[in-house]
Image (cartoon, grey):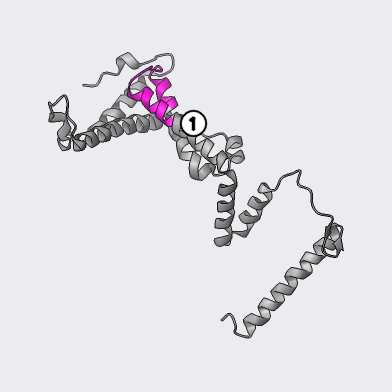
């Protein structure tokens, strides 16, 4: 029988919530069929069986997921800072899941009176390290991630998001040339590019109507 009484911090957790948390943990653990784990019957203290090692990892994963899911259900979860999300390219693809896992583990650690060792402490350390690594990775590969994002939007023809991302990548201190070819000044340069792309479009339309691209 799992005992939760010693882990309750009554200044933070109401008795009802603690009981509900215990119920959720027990219900989840009851779904794990221990008969599927041969390692539980192993009596070899020097066992090096790769299957047994895999089963230990799986059991540990079950326990971690059990505690995380019960915490989410009983106490909710924190959300990522919007300012941080906007300032780091690749947040949704590379960081969001790691941030969520680290936040859940942090919340779980505090709900269990911040143990200094054991599976909950190890989970906190592991998820925090993964979160910090994902941030470093995105900052180190900022340009590549931005380029991949813009390319993906262009391929999917999401032009609105494409131009928004292009504008974000441009430095506010970027200086623009005062002369392009024979055009001088902002107005003449805009007209130059306008006529250039207009001509290209007209050429494409003529070729398309002639059947060259059909």
- Please tell me in which quadrant of the rendered image residue 39 appears: top left
**Residue 99: x %, y % from top left:** 48, 35
- Of 199 and 114, the residue lying toward us: 199
- The local secondary structure at tag 1 comes to loop
Residue drawn at the location 24% of the way across and 32% of the way down: 56
- Please tell me in which quadrant of the rendered image residue 197 appears: bottom right
Please indicate, yes or no, whether residue 6 appears anywhere in the rendered image. Answer: yes
Quarter of the C terminus within the rendering: bottom right
Residue 129 lies in the magenta stretch:
no
Tally of numbered discs: 1
Residue drawn at the location 34% of the way across and 26% of the way down: 21
Please indicate, yes or no, whether residue 31 appears anywhere in the rendered image. Answer: no
**Residue 34: x %, y % from top left:** 18, 33
**Residue 16: x %, y % from top left:** 36, 21
Magenta range is 106-127
- Please tell me in which quadrant of the rendered image residue 57 appears: top left
- Compared across the picture, whether 16 is left or right of 204 comes to left
Residue drawn at the location 26% of the way across and 36% of the way down: 58
- Compared across the picture, whether 42 is left or right of 65 comes to left
Residue drawn at the location 81% of the way across and 54% of the way down: 177
Residue 115 lies in the magenta stretch:
yes
Specify the principal SS of the magenta part. Answer: helix
**Residue 212: x %, y % from top left:** 60, 83
- Which residue is identified by label 1? 78
Residue at the limit of the structure toward the right, as seen here: 184
């Amino acid at each position: 029988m799992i005992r939760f009484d010693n882990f309750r911090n009554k200044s933070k957790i109401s008795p009802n919530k603690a009981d509900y948390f215990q119920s959720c943990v027990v219900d989840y653990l009851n779904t794990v069929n221990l008969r599927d784990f041969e390692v539980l019957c192993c009596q070899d203290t020097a066992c090096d069986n790769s299957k047994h090692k895999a089963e230990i990892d799986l059991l540990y994963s079950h326990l971690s997921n059990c505690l995380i899911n019960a915490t989410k259900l009983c106490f909710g979860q924190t959300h990522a800072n919007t300012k941080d999300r906007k300032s780091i390219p690749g947040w949704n693809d590379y960081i969001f899941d790691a941030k969520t896992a680290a936040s859940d583990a942090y919340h779980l650690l505090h709900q269990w009176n911040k143990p200094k060792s054991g599976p909950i402490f190890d989970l906190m350390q592991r998820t925090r390290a993964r979160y910090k690594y994902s941030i470093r990775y995105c900052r180190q590969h900022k340009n590549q991630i931005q380029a991949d994002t813009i390319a993906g939007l262009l391929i999917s023809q999401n032009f609105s998001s494409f131009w928004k991302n292009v504008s974000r990548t441009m430095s506010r201190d970027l200086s623009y040339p005062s002369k392009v070819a024979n055009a001088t000044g902002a107005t003449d340069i805009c007209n130059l590019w306008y006529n250039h792309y207009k001509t290209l479009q007209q050429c494409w339309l003529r070729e398309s109507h002639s059947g060259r691209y059909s």
